[in-house]
Image (cartoon, rainbow, N blue to C red):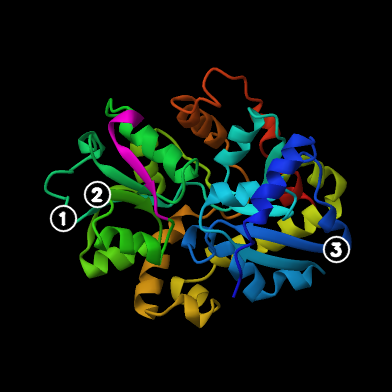
């Protein structure tokens, strides 16, 4: 339903970077249409994007919003920098990584106070891979190289003293492609989200190794809350389109309030039928995911520091660099009346 933008947009990014144009707001925004790239639109971590559309909140704000889907957050990020889209629904950590590369991008709505990610171990490898301390020589699945899942995977392994050179990260995407990678034995373990987690558990193909769907599980794995799924834009776009940014934020905040005042069954009833090929499984996965959502779209006070700590531990783009966290997010639009 939502086509992936063609690969020439990546070429557009290279051209934009060469001429210093990538830091400018996308010209396409001037026609009133807002294109939002979602890093995997069927993932429950990004449910607010589709749900907001389903509830009619974009239209209530007078917005013309187009939702597009890209399997990996790093690819969605590239579309934003290329000017192909005006906003991305992806992980907040990209805003920190990009600042160290001279790109000013900020989160204007936070959907998840935790990653909602789960490291799953293949049933075939479960006997020898009982923790992230056992990943030496293993192949670990991530959505894409340089994606948030690769950041988190490296951090979790490093916590056990294992270097990124001691295992292989394989980009396998999400949803059906992730499940296929597990079934075909191409990965020993991998990081994914709901409803893929519940589907693998139901089929017996994999088991949970590290669970970051709740605040408790995330604090145990990362040492604090970890704001993840969010709506982020180029800062220049936000500065030049404050009215649109405010309306977008207001629409999403209404959705976060809807999520916190309705049951998993009621929320699922608003989602497209093709998202719920197994309705019972979808509702169960959604119920397991509800604790991760913010109620108001605001950035958790301790969140940015935790994310920076994770990135600075291994990411060469961030390690040793000064990062002004105040420029990586704003609550201005979610609190605007």
The stretch drawn in magenta includes residue 199 = no
Give the quadrant of the C terminus: bottom right
Label 2, label 1: how far apart the Cα atoms are: 8 Å
Q: How many marks?
A: 3
Q: Determine the image quadrant of residue 285.
A: bottom left
User: Is the Cβ of the residue at disc 2 closer than 8 Å to that at disc 3?
Assistant: no
Q: 106 left or right of 24?
A: left
SS of the residue at dot 2? loop
Residue on which disc 2 sits: 188
Give the quadrant of the N terminus: bottom right
In the displayed structure, would residue 179 be above or below residue 233? below
> N-terminal of the two: label 2 or label 1?
1
Taking depth in this image into account, of 205 and 219 the one nearest to the observer is 205
In the rendered image, residue 150, in percent from the top left (x then y), is placed at 43, 41
Residue on which disc 1 sits: 124
Q: Which mark is residue 32?
A: 3
């Amino acid at each position: 339903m939502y086509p992936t933008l063609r690969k020439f947009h990546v070429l557009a990014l290279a051209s934009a970077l060469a001429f210093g144009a990538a830091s400018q707001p996308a010209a396409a925004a001037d026609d009133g249409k807002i294109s939002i790239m979602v890093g995997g639109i069927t993932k429950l971590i990004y449910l607010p994007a589709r749900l907001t559309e389903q509830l009619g909140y974009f239209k209530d704000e007078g917005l013309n919003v187009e939702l597009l889907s890209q399997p990996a957050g790093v690819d969605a990020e590239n579309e934003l920098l290329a000017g192909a889209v005006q906003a991305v629904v992806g992980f907040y950590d990209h805003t920190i990584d990009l600042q160290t590369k001279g790109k000013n991008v900020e989160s204007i709505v936070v959907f998840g106070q935790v990653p909602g990610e789960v490291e799953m171990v293949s049933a075939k490898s479960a006997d020898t891979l009982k923790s992230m301390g056992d990943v030496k020589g293993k192949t670990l699945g991530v959505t894409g190289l340089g994606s948030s899942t690769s950041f988190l995977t490296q951090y979790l392994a490093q916590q056990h003293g294992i270097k990124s050179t001691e295992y292989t990260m394989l980009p396998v995407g999400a949803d059906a492609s992730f499940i296929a990678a597990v079934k075909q034995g191409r990965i020993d373990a991998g990081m994914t989200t709901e409803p893929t987690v519940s589907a693998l558990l139901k089929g017996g193909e994999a088991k949970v190794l590290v669970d970051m769907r709740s605040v408790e599980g995330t604090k145990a794995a990362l040492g604090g809350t970890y704001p993840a799924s969010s709506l982020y834009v180029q800062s220049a776009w936000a500065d030049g389109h404050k009215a649109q940014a405010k309306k977008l934020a207001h629409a999403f905040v209404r959705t976060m309030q809807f999520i916190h005042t309705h049951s998993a069954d009621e929320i699922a009833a608003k989602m497209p039928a093709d998202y719920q090929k197994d309705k019972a499984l979808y509702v169960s996965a959604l119920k397991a995911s509800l604790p991760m959502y913010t109620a108001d779209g605001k950035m958790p006070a301790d969140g940015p520091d935790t994310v920076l700590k994770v990135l600075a531990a291994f990411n060469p783009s961030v390690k040793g660099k000064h990062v002004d966290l105040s420029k990586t997010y704003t609550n201005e639009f979610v609190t605007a009346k």
